[in-house]
Structures are given as structure tokens and as C-alpha cells.
Image: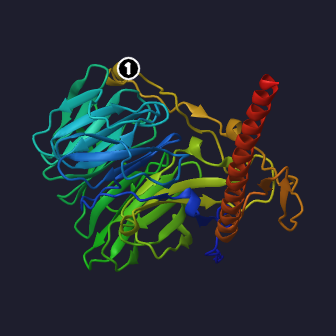
Amino acid sequence: MTISWRPTYRSSKFRNVYGKAGNREQCFDGIPITRNVHDNHFCAVNAKFLAIVTETAGGGSFLVIPVNKAGRIDPHQPKVCGHQGGVLDIKWNPFIDNIIASCSEDCSVRIWEIPEGGLRRNMSEAVLELYGHSRRVGLIEWHPTCSGILFSAGYDFKILIWNLEVGGPVKMIDCHSDVVLCMSFNTDGSLLATSCKDKHLRVIEPRSGKVLQEADCKSHRVNRVVFLGNMKRLVTTGVSRWNTRQVALWDQEDLSMPIIEEEIDGLSGLLFPFYDADTHMLYLAGKGDGNIRYYEVSTEKPYLQYLMEFRSPAPQKGLGVMPKHGLDVAACEVFRFYKLVTLRGLIEPISMIVPRRSETYQEDIYPMTAGTEPALTADEWLSGMDREPVLMSLKAGYKRPCQKAFKAPVRERKTMVVNGLLESIPPKTENELMRMFFRQQDELKRLREELVQKDVRLQQLELELNNLRNNANKL
């Protein structure tokens, strides 16, 4: 009998991935983030816009800010404010950057079209208003490969499928006995996984509404679920019977028992899972924590390989995720969160970066990824067709970092007076700016005094000229 030795450490190209928080200039500051306690992210982001649900009196609203216009946000920034109740979830259309869906306590789902460059005034008229739920709507998801299909889950325990091309519901999934907490699609959108307050995990065929697999999670109370791409696996986060936070891995074709269950910690905040199918990395972020743990997922034991943890003292209320085509490929960025810090009214970007020294495009960490073109129309999907996403390469967005840019030598700042006017190199600090301001004020005062003296002298010369003319006429 030969004893096989298997090391606990497994080599990985993502072993040294690290989180990098954005500096002050890259953050969005002064945002009245909603204080609603609903377990959602209240944030959605794409390559053009960042949307955040805000705290408002009466009705519900959310901000839409161009993603490249970071900094302090104007208190009178225009909002999307058509809902009569609090906004509970927002999601950008994966194929059209200017289209966003929202759902609310007013029992409606609404589709909005954001103008290029962002809002210039408050928007209260939606492109579509969808009514079908009898109670508030807490969750919405776009179909991953099909244009014009939207799923919504309400507190009436029902999931409605909306065909936006006709502007109405086409199917109701009515197999849940309590509130649906989470929805997740597999890669081609042919399967829908749901977690529910009735402690059941379900895998559903969405067009027929048939439950293919169901698990009664008594020992692992499931809160969130996510499909692991094409691995035929599901990851759930929840709570054990001892109230410790857990992550569990399941076979999507057999939910009788989880493949593994792993305890995380004893904190009480909800664990949000995020999966990146391109790198096979799973991120776990706790609501109310400042930390983001990340793992590498494999089909072999130990299945979940712990990599590292991003730590921050500021607690997160929710997290938006930038789509792949919006990442900085030149910096080897493989994932980007937008973290909501309610106490400071701050949205902070956090980039997950693979440390590489090479200046060439990194093919191994950027495989072909789901692009911005839909694979199906709504009618094709409803007729029974399934297609994999249309893939795109991120190489077109790669710009070689210019590390050998010319830098002028730092010299002592000089002030020059040319033709009586003060010219100066732009100030670099606040003190320099103040000194320059006072010098310019003195210079302006001197010039005004000179101007007054010249005006007086001019009047004297005009009087002398008139006297000379009068004397010449007398002669």
C-alpha cells in the first residue's frame, strides 16, 4: 500500500491578489446613502454610470453619477425620483449602458433611460412602469444572455418574468412559501437558483417554473446563493444552527447535502457572495464588516482555497460590482467593488489586482469574457432556446502603461514680473496659493493707483491743451 502525500498548499496565479482602496480623488463623497435596512446592495455600477439609492423624505429616489466624475457630489444633484415608495433594488441592463431597472415598496418595477453624460434635472418619467405584484418588490435580476427579459421577486412570494419588448409579464413562478431572498442564473440563463425565507434552496427551470432540485436547509440557513459559472456548482452563504456564518458548496444536480460547509466567523452581518467565472475567484463580504475575504474555487478538494483578506475599518452597507469590460486591464485589475460607507456618505472603489511587472497584455488572467451583445431576443428565449453568452476580448481596452514619461526636474518656484504684470508658476499647496493671492491683490491695488494718477494727469493735459487753443484764437 502506497501512501499518497498531498500538500495543503496549491500553487495559484491568484495567490497574491491584493485589494487596493481608491484615494480620496477616486471616491464619491457627500452622498446621502439610504438607511433602509432591506438586505440589498442599494448600488449598481457599469462602465458609464454609478447608481446609488438615497435617503429621501416621501417616495424613493436614486442618484446616477457618471463613473468618471468622482469627488464631492453636489447636494442638489438631480435624482431619479418617480417611485411613490422606497427603492429596494436597482440593476443596470447588461447590454445597454443607459438602461436601469428599479423596484420599490410601491409594488412597481420601473425601467429608466439615462441620458448620455448623466442627469441634468430630476427624472420622474420612466420608460416603462410594470405592475403585477400585490406587495412590495424587493429584488430584480436581468436575464444574463437575453435582451428585454427581467425577473422580479416580491413580498407576495412570487417571481414575475417581464418581457420588456411587450411591456408586460409573461410568466409567474409560484413555488415559494415565503419571501425570496436571492436569485442567481447559470451562465446561459437556463436555470434559476433561489434562496427563500422558508429555509429552502431551489433550482428552477424559469420558463416552466418547474422546481428541478430542492434542499431543506435546516442546519445551514441559506441567505444568498450564486451559480459558479459552468462548474455545475452552487455556493450559498448562511447561518449554522449555532448562529455562526457559513459558506456551503452544492452540486446543482443533487441538493440532498452540501459538498462542503465551512464556518467563517461568529459575526451577525449577512455575507454577500460574489463570483468571478473568469478567474474562478469567490469573494465574501459581510454587511456591516469592513473585510472582504476571497477564495479560489476548484472542482477538486479542497474546493475552496482561501487566498487572502482585504481589511478596512469602515463598515460596508452594500457593494456594487463593475462589469469586466469596465476594469483597468493595464493595471492587472481583475475585480472592482464600489463600497457604500453610510456613516461618511462615501462610495469607495476597491480594486482587486494581480501583481505583475510585465507591460504586455496578460492573456492568462483575462480570458474571453461575457460581452455587451445579447445572445438571444426575448421571443427566442421564451420559445425555448438557450445560448451561451457572446464572448469578447478585453485586449482592445488595454493601454500599455507609460512608465517612462518625461518628468521635468523639480526646481525652486520662481515669480517673475513682466511688463508690470505678475506671472507665476501654478501653486502646489494651499499656503502658496494664499501667498500668491495676496501678492496679486497688492499688485492690483498698485495698478489701480497708477491708473487713477494717469487719469488725473490726462485731465490736466486736456485743460492745458484747451488753454493753448483759446490763446491761439485770440491772437
The quadrant in which residue 394 appears is top right
On the rendered structure, is 228 left or right of 216? right
- Residue at x 55%, y 34% (from the top left corner): 371
Q: Nearer the viewer, residue 119 or 132?
A: 119
Q: Quadrant location of the N terminus? A: bottom right
Q: Is residue 448 above or below residue 12?
A: above
Q: Residue furthest left?
A: 134
- Residue at x 53%, y 47% (from the top left corner): 69
State the count of labels. Answer: 1
- Residue at x 31%, y 53% (from the top left corner): 54
The quadrant in which residue 242 appears is bottom left
Dot 1: what SS?
helix
| Scheme of image coloration | rainbow
Task: Residue 431: tell me if it is visible.
Answer: yes
The quadrant in which residue 369 appears is top right
The 10 Å Cα crowd at callout 1, few under 14, some 14 to 19, many 20 or more, is few
Q: Position of residue 390 (x, y in %)?
A: 54, 30
Task: Residue 208: tell me if it is visible.
Answer: no
Q: Position of residue 212 (x, y in %)?
A: 28, 43
The amino acid type of the residue labelled 1 equals: Glu
Q: Quadrant location of the C terminus? A: top right
Q: Position of residue 239 (x, y in %)?
A: 29, 71
Q: Nearer the viewer, residue 219 or 422?
A: 422
Task: Name the residue tied to disc 1.
Answer: 380
On the rendered structure, is 56 left or right of 249? left
